[in-house]
Amino acid sequence: MENDLIVIAGAGTIGCYLGGLLQAAGAEVVFLGRARIAAELAEFGLTLTDRDGARAHLPGSAIRATTEVDVLARAALVLVTVKSGGTEEIGRALGSHAQPGTLVVSLQNGVGNVALLRSLAVNQEVVAGMVPFNVVHLGKGCFHRATAGALVIESGVPAIAERLRTTGLAVIEHPDMQAVAWGKLLINLNNALNALSGLPLAQQLAVRAWRRVLADCIDEGLSALSRAGITPAQAGPLAPRLLPFVMRLPDWLFRQVARAQLRIDPLARSSMWEDLERGRPTEIDYLQGAIVSLAREVGTAAPTNARIQALVHRAESAQRGSPRLDPAALGSESG
């Protein structure tokens, strides 16, 4: 094991941004991901920007990127940033290659990834985390953070929080990460709407019809969670129970709230939009799909979430990028 080596397991948009911040702060980092990303980083290096004008650049010669999972054997800390569909694969790789006691932090969307990782990486210490902000891959090794928020890490492992704070990002610890994961999932229900709209996030949320669909999705989620006895934690500037109310506000009033609470960079888009544009599988089954599954288990209805799940699957199959739907289309066709 290399002393203090950090492996980014899933060098995609979030992984490259966080790994770049850590390396810029002096950490030893290896980016584990697909050959496409390794080649991009080698050619262009890694450029990190944010909505406040900050900029950092690491030349390609300074970046260590690999597609080989045996690098996990040398890691002291692994940040798991693969999409939810890749959790089983990386969990098995961790169980086979990572040293016993290696710290593993899941920084993924969805609510089941930590449990799955723990079942597969039984000799490693798996910790839950949450990334609240949006990062956009602008191409040529450039990754842009477009919204704000503090990283959240499971309480009890202060060394991880301190390590991540070296990047300059705010990091807080929380005792109930499952509640945090559900709170983040409610916010992430907009990922699919943004992908279906084809609009930048700020433009999409400026349209009340899209916000009303999001409010319906969140209401269905809150109803299912309540029936299941789960109280989602606040994972953004607004409490979960307030989200549907705020989303349904008239445009002029929503703009006032957004100006104060929901500052969004004009470049921001959801990762699901990027997945559709690049012809990759999305996380829809771990977002809207999780609400649909929970609602079925507890005997409530989630028709809006089911409809959106079906539309995203249709867009995945079409392989033509975002379908650029009008929000009225979400209720105009059979599911």
Image (cartoon, rainbow, N blue to C red):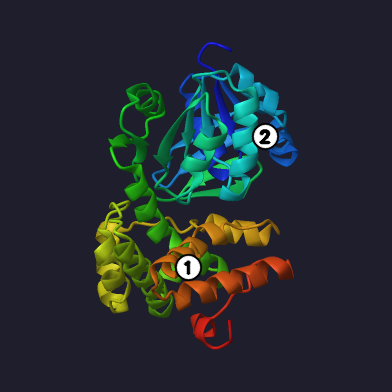
Residue 263 in the image: x percent, y percent? Answer: 34, 56
Asked whether 169 or 161 is in front, the reply is: 161
Residue drawn where x is 39% and y is 59% of the image: 187
Q: Quadrant of residue 297?
A: bottom left
Residue 148 appears in the rendering:
no
Residue 330 in the image: x percent, y percent? Answer: 52, 81
Mark 2 to mark 1: distance in Å?
38 Å
Instruction: Give the amino acid type for the residue marked by disc 2 in the picture.
Output: Leu
Residue 60 in the image: x percent, y percent? Answer: 67, 28
Asked whether 139 or 128 is in front, the reply is: 128
Q: Is residue 120 above or below residue 298?
A: above
Q: Are marks 2 and 1 in contact (CB under 8 Å)?
A: no
User: Relative to 214, is 309 on the left or the right?
Assistant: right
Residue drawn where x is 46% and y is 76% of the image: 304
User: Relative to 239, is 298 on the left or the right?
Assistant: right
Residue 292's disc number: 1
Looking at marks 2 and 1 on the same chain, the residue that comes earlier in the sequence is marked by 2
Residue 210 in the image: x percent, y percent? Answer: 43, 75
Residue 237's disc number: none
Residue 41's disc number: 2
Please identify the quadrant where the C terminus is shown: bottom right
Nearer to us: label 2 or label 1: 1
Q: Quadrant of residue 261?
A: bottom left
Q: Is residue 220 above or below residue 189?
A: below
Residue drawn where x is 29% and y is 59% of the image: 229
Badge 1 crowding class, 10 Å Cα cut-off, few under 14, some 14 to 19, many 20 or more, is: many
Residue 137 appears in the rendering:
yes
Q: Which structural element holds mark 1?
A: helix
Instruction: Give the amino acid type for the residue marked by disc 1 in the picture.
Output: Val
Q: Is residue 4 above or below residue 237?
A: above
Badge 2 crowding class, 10 Å Cα cut-off, few under 14, some 14 to 19, many 20 or more, is: many
Q: Which structural element holds mark 2?
A: helix
